[in-house]
Image (cartoon, helix red, strand yellow):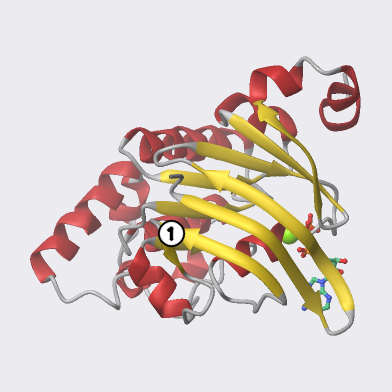
Amino acid sequence: MALLEVSGLVVHYGKALALDGVEMRIEAGELVAVLGPNGAGKSTLLKAISRALPASAGRLVFREKAIDALAVHEVVAAGIGHCPEGRHLFSDLSVRKNLLLGAYLRGDKAAIAADLEHVFALFPVLRERQHQLAATLSGGEQQMVAIGRALMGRPALLLLDEPSVGIAPRLKEVLFDAIRQIQTAGTAILLVEQDASVAFRVASRIYLLEHGRIVREGRSADLAGDDDVRQIYLGI
Ligand SMILES: Nc1ncnc2c1ncn2[C@@H]1O[C@H](COP(=O)(O)OP(=O)(O)OP(=O)(O)O)[C@@H](O)[C@H]1O
Ligand SMILES: [Mg+2]
């Protein structure tokens, strides 16, 4: 069985339909990307998986257990980390405190310290800046904090919503190197990414989401060879 199985997922905002029967699965350790135009429902999908938004219908099964009825903190404890669009850091707290907030459900002090070291090894600039206020960091560095904070919950699945938006090209490279390292270390990743060429490069499988529906799914290499997909998503 897959790590995460999403079936028939329907989400509304009031009367407006945002997700219309989404089917998706993610295997342990896999890096999967979701691509789609603005307003397609990508962020809604991640929020529904992390239970930040209620679903009107459908099933979410993670590690063979239904998570449909869990509260947000229970989903974190179950092993899903959500790095939301726009980062949502506490700007008047230090980098270190922001990172430690990601471990707020844990009591294992020694392991938390080890995980903080792991985040600093992944993003050395955060070690240097750990005592600075989060607000003083660049956009790319703030994104590193947001990812690091999610890692502090020890997720088996990390949900990343547009991590590279508004980030300088050099930091984007650093960020995606780190994302690959996180995957190599065994964490599955569900990545929403505006830059389709990056998504095709890093993900092994891709889902195309339009108007709240999955319209295509396949291995990156296969989809990248499809003329329609190339034209619409890669512009080539
Ligand atoms: N809080 C909200 N209340 C009402 N409608 C919403 C809300 N959030 C999103 N929507 C609507 O739901 C649909 C899906 O939005 P969502 O943010 O999931 O899209 P997205 O694919 O992440 O877009 P983007 O690429 O711009 O981030 C859109 O039509 C959007 O206008
Ligand atoms: Mg979005």
Disc 1 beta carbon < 8 A from ligand 2? no
Q: Element type at marker 1?
A: helix
x, y (%) of residue 200?
66, 27
Q: Residue at x 77, y 14 (%)?
A: 225
Q: Farthest residue toward the left?
A: 110
Q: In this view, does 123 lie above or below 81?
A: above
* Residue 94 shows in the view: yes
Q: Residue at x 88, y 55 (%)?
A: 211
x, y (%) of residue 75?
43, 71
Front position in the image: 27 or 190: 27
Q: Residue at x 31, y 62 (%)?
A: 152
Which of the 4 image quarters holds residue 95?
A: bottom left
x, y (%) of residue 210?
85, 49
Q: Farthest residue toward the top?
A: 225
- Of the 4 image quadrants, the one containing the C terminus is top right
User: Where does label 1 land, which residue?
Assistant: 145
Left or right: where 114 falls relative to 66: left
x, y (%) of residue 13?
81, 79
Left or right: where 121 falls relative to 73: left
Q: Residue at x 20, y 52 (%)?
A: 117
Which of the 4 image quarters holds residue 99?
A: bottom left
Which amino acid type is shown beneath numbered disc 1?
Val
Q: Residues within 10 Å of mark 1 (few under 14, many from 20)?
A: many
Front position in the image: 139 or 221: 221
